[in-house]
Amino acid sequence: VRGIVAAAAYLPGRSPDRVGVRAPDEDGFTMAVEALERLLEGVPPPARELPLQVVGDLDPVPPEGFSPLLGSPVGLLRAPGGGAGLREAVIAAAARDGPEVILAVSSRPAGPVTAAHAPRDAAAAILLGDRADGSVFSPETGRPPGATALEEAVGWYRAVPEALHPSWLGDWDAALRAGAGWAAGSSDPSPPARVAEGAYWPRPTYQEGLPSRWRLTAERCTHCQRTSFPSRGQCRGCGRRDALTPVRLDRRGGRVIALTWIGPGGQPTEFDPQVEGTGGYGVAIVEVAPGTFGTFQLADVVRGEVSLGDPVRTSLRRLYAQEGAWRYGRKASPLRPGDGRRS
Ligand SMILES: [Zn+2]
């Protein structure tokens, strides 16, 4: 029987007064990526390329799509938004073969959050595949009237043994309470037209770096055993180009080695709009694997909240806009209780 075999969700926002509200550098795409990464941590990698079905308008999906994140081609299907669209997407996926992921995002319209305009940013990722027990949603088993795909996912989540859970930070009940808020859609503003002249990065150069920037892919040298990050096709230890094996680093396995805070005026010009909008930001050198280091902007922190030696995780966030599109990369944030570091 084909049905939901795994589900994960992401509700942004940490402090009590901004639960469910995305950070300025989060959008529908980054929230979907977060849910997708949590989902895929709990399941074995698919044997072939993974189709993704996006419920509603996950605006903006960058031109690069999801492929750099998964490291394989991704077929992208679009389904209508809202709870009805999500249910239709599950039914359609259940009729097809092979594993398939459905992504749905609820995105608050831009603007101030008021009581009447309750925050409800959230993202869900649902994996469909073959299930032997037939205990969860499938067209064949028939479902109680009114059951929604998300409720099925919740039921699955609560029923399976703890060890099988995709890592989980969010609150399914809150996601369900959001109700109609699960209508997908986003009014994210278009990227600013201004071009950063101080650090112009041609799109092809940016795209070449995406395996490292998005997936935390490094290169391990089989000659001298050194791991180089970000990947650049040459070992930083011995200089060889012919002994490199790609390895994916643990996105929750970092530790802060050095830390600085960039105040207004100190930022590269491509970050001018960010600084004008939200002020200065932190930058950390992170030991991403033993003896391997990367530089990351900090996300979801205020000055003083991160210290040397702190464990951090990384997540995909907006960096800046260039050539008419948002560019994305990983930023580091403190590893908090519930982040579920896997060893
Ligand atoms: Zn080497």
Image: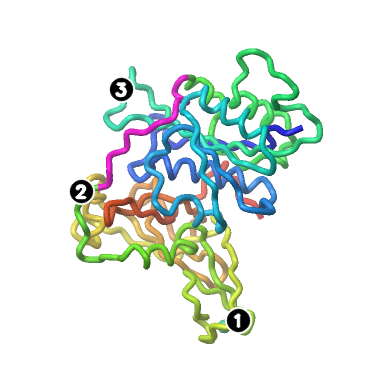
Amino acid type of the residue that numbered disc 3 sits on in the rendered structure? Thr
Residue at 27 percent of width and 56 percent of height = 323
Please name the residue that numbered disc 3 is placed on: 114
Relative to 70, is 205 above or below?
below
Pointers 2 and 1 in contact (C-beta within 8 Å): no
Residue at 26 percent of width and 45 percent of height = 278
What whole-number distance in Å separates the C-alpha atoms at marks 3 and 1?
A: 56 Å
Locate the N terminus and report the quarter of the image it occupies: top right
Most foreground residue, 42 or 1: 1
Chain-order first, disc 2 or disc 1: 1
Applied colour scheme: rainbow
Considering the numbered disc 1 on the image, is that residue within a helix, a strand or a loop? loop
Residue 132 magenta-highlighted: no
Pointers 3 and 1 in contact (C-beta within 8 Å): no
Residue at 57 percent of width and 69 percent of height = 290
In the displayed orientation, state which residue is furthest to the top: 145
Please name the residue that numbered disc 2 is placed on: 276
Q: Whereabouts is ligand 1, in terms of quadrant?
A: bottom right
Chain-order first, disc 3 or disc 1: 3
Pointers 2 and 3 in contact (C-beta within 8 Å): no
Please name the residue that numbered disc 1 is placed on: 243
Tell me where the magenta segment starts and ends, as one range.
180-191
Amino acid type of the residue that numbered disc 2 sits on in the rendered structure? Glu
Secondary structure of the magenta portion, mostly?
loop
Most foreground residue, 336 or 110: 110
